[in-house]
Image (cartoon, helix red, strand yellow):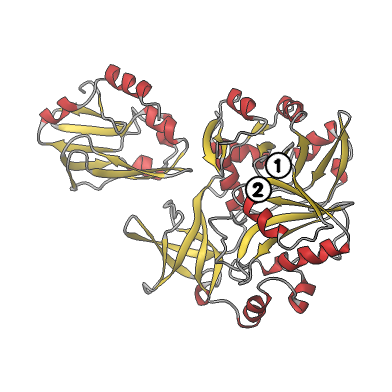
Amino acid sequence: MSEKKFSKKHEWVSLEGDIATVGITKHATEMLGDIVFVEVPNAGKSIEKEGQAAVVESTKAASDVYSPISGEVTEGNKVIADDPGSVNGDPEGKSWFFKLKIKDKGELDSLMSKDEYDKFCKENPN
Amino acid sequence: MAIQKTALYDLHKSLGAKFVPFAGYEMPIQYKDGIVKEHISTRTHAGFFDVSHMGQFFLEGDETLVEALERIIPSDLKSLKVNHSKYSFLLNDNGGIIDDLIVTKTNSGFCIILNAACKENDIKHISKFLGTNHKFLLNNDLSLIALQGPKSVEILEKLIPGVSKLKFMTGNNFNYDSESLYITRSGYTGEDGFEISISNKKVKALIDFLINNGVKPIGLGARDTLRLEAGLCLYGHDLNEKINPIEANLKWAIAKKRKEVGGFNGWNKIKSLLINGSKKIRVGIKPEGKVIARENTKIFSSDNEEIGLVTSGTFGPSVNGPVAMGYVKSKFSKIGTLIQLEVRGKKYGGKVSGLPFYKKNYVK
């Protein structure tokens, strides 16, 4: 898998061939607190870059998850929909949200590297 | 107005609190453990809550004070014994709820605990009904600490002998470090516990004792999940000036004698609702599956008629699923009625549920 890239809306994406895996960052889960509901997209759904793709809710509030890249969903992670709390455990690993078949790898260029993202989080603590 | 802080602000900070502005105060919404753990530790052990933002309003006066207060509070204050508390409300001329409150009879009058966001307005309202011979004071020199959970009694008894003898919704004065404290057995979580009124100077020492005895700090986030599981209303969400106690399904909180005789604000309206019932009523709502129906979620009947709105909704950690309450047209209020909840444009199933969602353990 390729190195992870990060969005300002606290999603991560990694690429394997033309399949992108998308999830929310550890920083995002720390901001959200205990995650108690997750809705992931079904296979076949087309999503535009920065389009609303999934929902994550903590005890406090509901938030949308956006896709950092355009494509067609190949799989939503049913495991996290059944056990939303597991997202707090491993958000950047096995608790990915969805996989997409992408069209344009170039869309990743506008995203941040890990170092850039960490710096972004420090400068924008909320 | 500048944002206010309670006497424990620095302590909250040292405990890793995340703060939010609430009713003009900077208050902890959660600590390091997070809402779910804080909720569970309150249910299984004990937690403390800084609720010093709430108004501690003291009134003194003769029997004319009782008459004045009975104009706006539909409790039987005349018969209320010293050190006994009642849940009640301040009512406007239409029977609408200006605030919900706990009123306790003291030796010299009454103490009323008011919601933080309402307290200034409440006092303006109450004072309109008072006479020149009545004294009143919003005491900002006092902190208010709620200690809640099954271990509360054992822990507090070690520090303040005698508290274990209090029954639910009663209170008394106790000595602590050469100061007189007022402690009631009450709370807002569905658990056994106490509310401790203590000077801002001594509150830190009390909290240190609680922490050393394994009591966790609990923020407003878990306070909300706990009270919702317990079926208790949150003012400004489940209650407001346009809702009356009959609609709010709180007619039990109007004293029997007052229901018969009246003589309080909004009595005509409430009398007719007691006879005819209200058009809408507050109910518990249990969404199917995991979807959370938050405040302002539209409620539909099984044949798609819009029948009401959710006023509070969250994930209940002890129920291990979503819980909500809201108002529905009365004919749909029977427990078990199938409903639909519109969340993000999609309709999800649910049921009208009895309250509380979580069984209480009060010491009576």
Residue B322 can be seen, yes or no: no
Say which amino acid is labelled 2. Answer: Thr
Question: Does A125 sit above or below residue B124?
Answer: above
On residue B189, which mark appears? 2
Q: Are marks 2 and 1 in contact (CB under 8 Å)?
A: yes
The answer to whether B36 is drawn above or below residue B320 in the figure is: above
Asked if residue A16 lies left or right of residue B33, the reply is left
Q: Give the quarter of the figure containing the C terminus of chain B.
A: bottom right
> In which quadrant is the N terminus of chain B drawn?
top right
Q: CA distance from mark 2 to mark 1?
A: 7 Å
Q: As rendered, which of B355 and B76 lies closer to the eye?
A: B76
What residue type is disc 1 on? Gln
Answer with the quarter of the image where residue B31 lies. Answer: top right
Residue furthest to the top? A115
Residue at the image point whose x is 30% and y is 44% from the top = A54
Q: Which residue position holds label 1?
A: B148
Residue A25: in sight, yes or no? yes
Report the residue at 39% width, 27% height from top: A27
Q: Earlier in the sequence, mark 2 or mark 1?
A: 1
Q: Are marks 2 and 1 on the same chain?
A: yes
User: From the viewer's perspective, is B295 left or right of B100?
Assistant: left
Specify the subunit that label 2 lies on: B
Residue drawn 71% across the image and 59% down it: B126
> Which image quadrant for residue B122?
bottom right
Q: The residue tagged with tag 1: helix, strand or loop? A: strand
Q: Secondary structure at mark 2?
A: loop
Chain where mark 1 sits: B
**x%, y% of residue B125?**
67, 59
Give residue B312's position: percent from left, percent from top.
51, 55
Q: Is A17 or B167 nearer to us in this picture?
A: B167
Residue B206, given in percent of the width and then of the height, sits at 76, 29
